Image: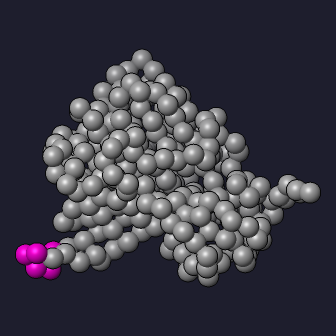
Amino acid sequence: CESGEEDEFRRTFNESVFSQMLFLGNDDMASTTSYGNVFWASDLLGVPAPNNWVYFRVADFYAARKISPGAAQLYYNFMIIDFADLFRRVGRPVLPPAALPEGLVLTAAANDGVPAPLSVVAKLQDAATAQKVAKAALHDDWIGSGAGAGTKQWRSHWHSNLTFYGPGGIGRAHGVEQYRQHVLEPFRAAFDDRSLDTKIFGCEGNYCGAFGELSGRHVGTWLGLEASGKILSIRFALNWRVVDGLVQEGWALFDIPAVFKQLDLDFFAMAAAAVPPIHS
């Protein structure tokens, strides 16, 4: 929200209730994934208010440093809001409909507390293995070459019965085939020469999170954006739950308005220009 979205967001939605789904951290970082039920009462960055309660999803990543043997201090925070899904919900979609179901995002399908994980539970888990698996998922899926249907590289760290909660425009995948076909393959086909800059990464027990930027040459259509030939940077917020050495669940958000801005497109102006349905 480097363009002031958060400040305007707080002014626009002055009635709100937030529910955390994930909250994990260690001495160096923290990550939270939440959803808010808010009353949208005034325009948001030019997008007219529906004057109704709406739902939106948000992820925060924090970087921390130790200031004493028993204390740490946060020094950086980045928030990503799922604006694509928010605008879809109020009848002002900017992205084309996803091939997968959109809208429903849940906390971990485990008795690890809400938000997950409870620290007393996480202490009993193998954080070293989770970190290794999550780093493999981050690199192999989004940067590596193992996403083809005939390869096993991208499969090696995902449970066959995985659930992946993507943002608006991507949707929710169940199982490795949906994840491959509707999440990985469109991204890989759209971006060549991909690279990764991980700014924050950490695990608490078997829950891990990463924030950073993916970059690549835009050579194909992704989220309705036709190939531009430009090098684009895509900020991401990713979380994983690792069980028995495999990722059972994943959560992802991307800073889509910033991608549009790199293509000289105003995501919020496009949402404002969309015509919502008329309800009698």
The secondary structure that most of the magenta stretch takes on is strand
Q: Is residue 275 visible?
A: yes
The foreground one among 164 and 211 is 164
Residue at image position (38%, 61%) is 32
Q: Bounds of the magenta span? A: 66-70
Residue at image position (58%, 72%) is 16
Q: Position of residue 95 (x, y in %)?
A: 68, 50
Q: Position of residue 92 (x, y in %)?
A: 76, 57
Q: Is residue 78 magenta?
A: no
The foreground one among 81 and 191 is 81
Q: Is residue 67 magenta?
A: yes
197 lies left or right of 267: left
Residue at image position (81%, 63%) is 273
Q: Position of residue 262 (x, y in %)?
A: 58, 61
Does 16 sit above or below residue 129? below
139 lies left or right of 69: right
Residue at image position (18%, 40%) is 129
Q: Position of residue 5 (x, y in %)?
A: 58, 74
Q: Residue furthest left?
A: 69
